[in-house]
Image: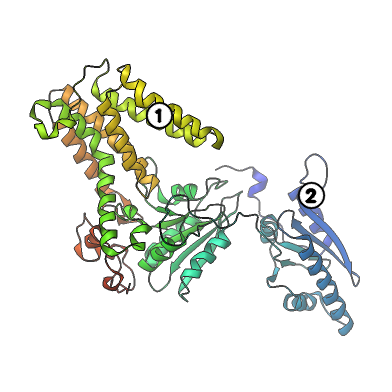
Amino acid sequence: MAMTEPKNEPLPPISTKLEDNINYLNELLGVGQGPGHSWDIMAKSFNFSKLNMMSYVLNGYFLTMNVVLILDDLEKRIQTFVTENESYTLHDLMNYLNTNVAFVQVQPVTKMEDVVRFILSGPMVTFVDGYDAALLIDTRIYPMRSIQEPEIERVVRGPRDGFTETMLMNTALIRRRLREPSLRAELMQVGLRSKTDVSLMYLEDVANPDTVKTIRERLESIQTDIVAMAEQSVTELIGNVKWNPYPIVRYTERPDVAATALVEGHVVIVVDTSPEVIIAPITFFQLLQHPEEYHQYPSVGTYRRWTMLIAAFITIFLPGLFLLVNFHSELVPKQLAFFKADRADPLPLWLELIVAEVAIDILRLAVMTSPLTLASMVSIMAAIIFGQFVSQIHLLQPEVLVYMAFVMVAQFSLTSYDLASANQLSRLFILICTQLGFAFHLRAVGFGVAVFIWLVYVMTRKSFGIPYFWPLMPFKWKNGMDNVLLRKPFTTIHGRPGVLRPKIQKRDG
């Protein structure tokens, strides 16, 4: 995205003159009071042992007592050094402070670009007159909420801790579960203006190096002003999503899911300000797995997995199949009479199905956007209207309400909200094609063609070079389709998904 010309100019080097550095930063950052200035960037001058210094720190990222203690220690260290050394250079002094200031993260910064980035990220940066570098002391405490239970991937039994909007906390939650020396967490900034912190995590001795290289290069090549939508912005920028509705990554709020993905050979991307991390690459069937399966016994987990698979295909095909059956209701046996919707209503059946789809979506949006105190009232009003009056006024048939409600329940049962939304668009496409087939007297051809097009579409998709419909296409049973259909006991898990091409194929548990 285009930026103003001054933003593209390289920043000058750090000057040995303190006044030059102060004037430049104050103008660049708008430090000061009144219109055109920023009140939350604090600049404080000091004079310790005849050394003139200036410190910059971002308000809201520190505790006042911590900064007072650090500055007190800084003054004592300078006085001690000056007393013990009759002749010294400022370079010697900075090396001494770098190793002796009583704080964990202390380091010199030699580039003005890094100085500006660090100031706007929260650490305290101090300039010393006569020295062409700055001293960084990381005093940050992040504004953050406490760890809470994930909102989406809830479990009956299992951990209740979920990711927060702070990247540092999220990487710590992953490392707590994966104390592995080969776990790498590469830090980079994306967004020309936002400079959003992003952490690329992978197991060096497991993950495919080509996949890691591809994702790293795409992250580093992001050219956009701001990554405001966090994980979604990053996904679209590195995944070349365009108009593809099907998710090419998996989002999770659970550290245990992220840690398991790393062990399998996936790459995890942690974006600051987002409570969800990105797992890539991913396949269609991996999006259907739920952590609850692994907090139950294998037989129960397998049943749940089959239920999830059935729910996924119900959300895609049931409305189109319902419409197709009613086009040929004379062929429906008595045992399947509940599939018939033979009441004469003003609207054709296919339009009733679409009206029901849109109406349910409007209800869902109303509940999502309404204040919490009004959401219950909205739900009750909708239940009364949809449950009774819609059928009485012959707007929708009872069978349409039943089947569309069933489809919605199946949609909300899916682990991946993005996959459920993509399935919704797919079923609308199949529904319209089925109606067009009937309109042109092609009987079941419209439904068959729509299903065929859907299969070809998902089978030709890829997630960072990985076939999206694997292990069904291309077909693979061992460490592939068997893991889709069965929740194996941990004692029988001995491999990783071959489609990821991990360095080490063998895995225990």
Residue located 36% across and 58% down the image: 292
Q: Residues within 10 Å of mark 2 (few under 14, many from 20)?
A: many
Question: Circle 2 sits in a helix, a strand or a loop, which is it?
Answer: loop
Q: Does the image show residue 395?
A: no
- Kindly report the distance in space between the C-alpha atoms of the residues bearing marks 1 and 2: 56 Å
Q: Quadrant of the N terminus?
A: top right
Residue type at mark 1? Ala
- Position of 434 with respect to 491 (left or right) is left
Residue 277: which numbered mark, if any? none
Chosen colour scheme: rainbow
**Label 2 belongs to which residue?**
31
Taking 265 as reference, is 355 above or below it?
Answer: above
Find disc 1 in the rendering and name its residue.
Answer: 383
- Residue lying at the far right in this picture: please name it: 50
Image coords of residue 36 (percent x, y):
77, 41
User: Residue 383 at x, y = what percent?
Assistant: 40, 29
Helix, strand or loop at disc 1?
helix
Picture quadrant of residue 456:
top left
- The location of residue 341, given as percent across then percent down, is 20, 25
Q: Nearer the viewer, residue 21 or 299?
A: 299
Picture residue at 66% right of the left edge, 57% below the top = 121
Identified by mark 2, the residue type is Val
